Image: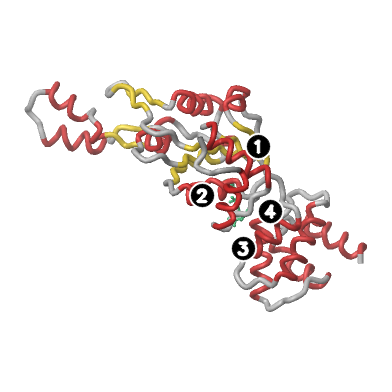
Amino acid sequence: MSQFESPAALAAALRSVDYLPDERIAQVAYLADALGKPILVEGPAGVGKTELAKALATITGRDLIRLQCYEGLDESRALYEWNYKKQLLRIQADEGSDWSEIAGDIFSEDFLLARPLLQAIRSEQPVVLLIDEIDRVEMETEALLLEVLSDFQVSIPELGTVAAKTQPMVLLTSNNTRELSEALKRRCLFLHISYPTPEREREILMARVPDLPAKLADEIARVARSVRAMDLKKSPSVSETIDWARTLLALGIEHVDAEVVADTVHVFLKYQTDIDRALKEFATSE
Ligand SMILES: Nc1ncnc2c1ncn2[C@@H]1O[C@H](COP(=O)(O)OP(=O)(O)O)[C@@H](O)[C@H]1O
Ligand SMILES: [Mg+2]
């Protein structure tokens, strides 16, 4: 059961915290909540994947627990590790006493460092668990994450099995730098977020950049759309159009024309070849 009445109700809640979803985003988030399934959110950088998890945590009143993935991420960073330093101090403090007693002691909860997955599983209150940029970890680590997600339990040899007391809402994000396993995809609801329509981007800009005039937001969104249609190495993301809007506001610019674009293009394009190409296309389209 979802705590929201409908996808539309969830969309309204997201908008109230300045996250502007499209219909698909609201529908998938609603279903994830209703069916208790993880969401695999995929799409280019800077389109609101991470932000969606934060916004969902805010509107459900849950804590957000985030596991940022990177190459080389391992169990000790994702799940748990023993606090060796504390264990060592305990052993030193107790020199001479019975070893079996010490061993029982230092492999107890007090000496455990819970990392994000274990934290999410142990939490008394249901949380939102964000496994961010999962495409950055190796296949074996992905399999480990999958195992935890399927059972919602972690087995710690010295302690036994820790089963989830509450069910987290899980979001996994991917920037698509590699294919994810079929097994992972099977388990998740799939959500692709692409660049917003100019109408939605305009709303996002207005929500995220205080005092931005509607007309300027509109022009920025339109330019963004035409730039994204060009064959560039790296299209501008929503974060970059937000930066551009802030830049124009800071410079006191009220209207976007070819000259303004030429003067500020480096704020939303980050490769010189892209800048050259965009300026050329704008010059010929005038
Ligand atoms: N739908 C949206 N509503 C409101 N802000 C958004 C939306 N999508 C993107 N943003 C803005 O763009 C920024 C980048 O989004 P982020 O979630 O970090 O991107 P990524 O997809 O790379 O995780 C956010 O901090 C937020 O300000
Ligand atoms: Mg992100």
Helix, strand or loop for disc 4? loop
Helix, strand or loop for disc 2? helix
Helix, strand or loop for disc 3? helix
Which label sits on residue 237?
4
Of residue 60 and residue 255, the one placed in the foreground of this image is 60
Lower sequence index among marks 2 and 4: 2
Q: Is mark 2 within 8 Å of ligand 1?
A: yes
Which label sits on residue 54?
2
Q: Which residue is mark 3?
A: 207
Q: Is mark 3 within 8 Å of ligand 1?
A: yes
Lower sequence index among marks 1 and 3: 1
- Would residue 69 be seen by someone viewing this image from the given angle? no
Q: Is residue 283 left or right of residue 250?
A: right
- Residue type, mark 2 in image: Lys
- Label 4: few (<14), some or many (≥20) within 10 Å? many
Compared with residue 240, is residue 209 higher up or lower down, i.e. above or below?
below
